[in-house]
Amino acid sequence: MATRSTTPARRAVRSLSWLLAIVILLGALLGAGALFWGWKLAPQLGLDLQGGTEIILTPQLTNGKPPTTDELNQAVSIIRQRVDAAGVSESEISTQGVNNIVVSIPGTPDAATLQRIRASAKLDFRAVICASSATTPSAACTPTAPTATPTPGATATPAPALSDTPATTPTSGSDEAWVTPKVLNTYSNFKCSTLTSVDTNLAPTNKPLVTCDDAGTTVYVLGPVEVNGATISDATASTITSSQGVSTGQWAVNLTFNGAGTAAFAKISSRILTLTPPRNQFAAVLDGKVITAPVMQAAITDGKAQISGSFTQATATSLADQLKFGALPIGFKVQSQNTIAATLGKSQLQNGLIAGGIGLLLVVIYSLFQYRLLGFVTILSLIVAAALTYEVIDFLSWQNGYRLSLAGVAGLIVAIGFTADSFIVYFERIRDELRDGRALPGAVEAGWKRALRTIYAAKTVNLLSAIVLFAVAVGNVKGFALTLGITTVIDVLIVIMFTHPMLQLIAQTRFFSSGHPLSGLDPNALGAIYRGRAEFRFDPAARGTGASREAARRQTIAERKAAELAAATAKPQKSDIPERQLVDTPPGKSPVSAVDTSNEAPSATESTSTGPTSSSSAATSVARTQPKRSSKSSRTGGKKS
């Protein structure tokens, strides 16, 4: 016997309570976001409905040749990955002509997003040869051959007469032979304020580089590139932990190199470890600027390094994403940045909402027509699903940067039919159980077990379709796939935590359990079959012709044969003895046939003519009407006849 705590009604109340808690929790998060974090109670709209910002990028050419088509396509792919990683969905990135790239972003992008787009994120590792304060360059960095004395107040452009050829062949990236007269002149007169204009991000990888750190306080002379950023297989942002495992609160970028990068980094770190300052430093150069130049304290042989500096969580995460997705094959600069209007506008959004309202109204009408008052369970389920979907979309919009486009609205409209389909499958399973003679509480539980398998199978197909579409699509189609996947998960959640519990509760009410004609669960209208004691009660005389035909149509083969056998065996009990064999009986005695007189032996004439003929006819009649069950029963029947 089930305990009180496991009754269907108790389980239904528990499920409804959990669903209510989820709805309240999401509502509380949205309310807190609106009060403290600047969120709004409406989701952000996409580029086609709200408009945004258009940025045109033009390449920085190093040899005067325009970029190739492959380079532009690769740049488009990398920029799209960076923008998506920033949480800016529904953006559009495409090429314009043979040189430019057009980036269209919904709304107004912040400075971090613009930096993600413009930065080439070209990361290289170079050995430090010389380093000094940006205000007073050091004279300790001397060339290996006599050099011209730099004129005080000279510009950063080196004198043409100065040699740029090393006096001796450098043996490594840390060799001071790289400091030629030309490099020394540039180093002595370098101004960090001119770092952007001199295009240090375009410097050759096989020559030394004079540049500054990101803060503009230190000037460096760096050797050629020894480890390329392309050898980085993964990059993540995290806080630095001390030797005791305590977080210092300072953000850093953790790098993981592939096989080639690991081998090169191990070789270089072992060499630099034995040098004197500042040549024992190894600089990480991002887009021509030194972001960190740590002192090498141990050889790094496991292929894992950490870049630390003046990072915040946002800048560390941005750099990690840029390094993970790779550097742009060519450098870009912003040619123009303009505000663009919505391509479709809010009127199209209103039309989409009207279309969704019409679809929802049609579903409501069909539910009430087909299921009477049971259709209100469908309506309530759709209302709860709509509220939960709105909360999830709004939360994703402000927490993860999702923007609702017209394609996303289309996904929400399509989901109305998918959601109603789950309810219809469940209701029809319950009706099948009622036709089979079950009482409503038992029909709800049995129908749920059968319907749940069907619902799971259908929703799994929908979810897989949404996942595949989201993975392979770009732009607005991703928005459609995302809303389709979200509504599919919410559909399963609603049918488990709301629709089924509601059916469990209303099955306990007299209105529905008694099979009222307006309940949509009338057993007479459904053609229910009475199965015996403790099963669904109905009045056979009250069943209409339509219900009789429905019951006959749904009978199994065994039931149909049993009915035919009962009809065939009932008729001979009254008519298997011919009227001509009945004889007159005195008053007060029952009539006796001539072939079966009580305790009297038949005459010779009767024994030879009438008796055998009648017995043979009766046996033949029974054999023709009674179906064969088994060989044993056939033999038994023959002896009795």
Image (cartoon, rainbow, N blue to C red):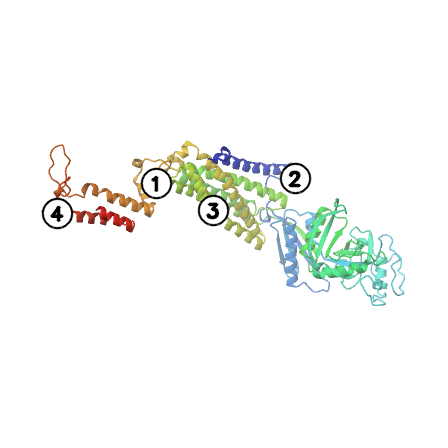
Eye-nearest disc, 3 or 2: 3
Q: Nearer the viewer, residue 107 or 368?
A: 368
Eye-nearest disc, 1 or 4: 4
Image x and y of residue 172, in percent: 81, 64
Q: Which residue is mark 4?
A: 607
- Callouts 1 and 4 close, C-beta under 8 Å: no
Q: Earlier in the sequence, mark 2 or mark 1?
A: 2
The kind of residue tagged 2 is Gly
* Residue name at image x 82 percent, y 65 percent: 171
Circle 2 residues within 10 Å: few <14, some 14–19, many ≥20: few
Image x and y of residue 61, in percent: 71, 62
Q: Which residue is mark 1?
A: 529
The kind of residue tagged 3 is Arg
User: How far apart are the two marked residues, 1 and 4, measured between alpha carbons?
Assistant: 50 Å
The kind of residue tagged 1 is Ile
- Callouts 2 and 4 close, C-beta under 8 Å: no
Q: Earlier in the sequence, mark 4 or mark 3?
A: 3
Image x and y of residue 83, in percent: 65, 51
Eye-nearest disc, 4 or 3: 4
State the image quarter where residue 442 is shown: top left
Label 4: which secondary element: helix
Q: Which residue is mark 2?
A: 38
The kind of residue tagged 4 is Ser
- Callouts 3 and 2 close, C-beta under 8 Å: no
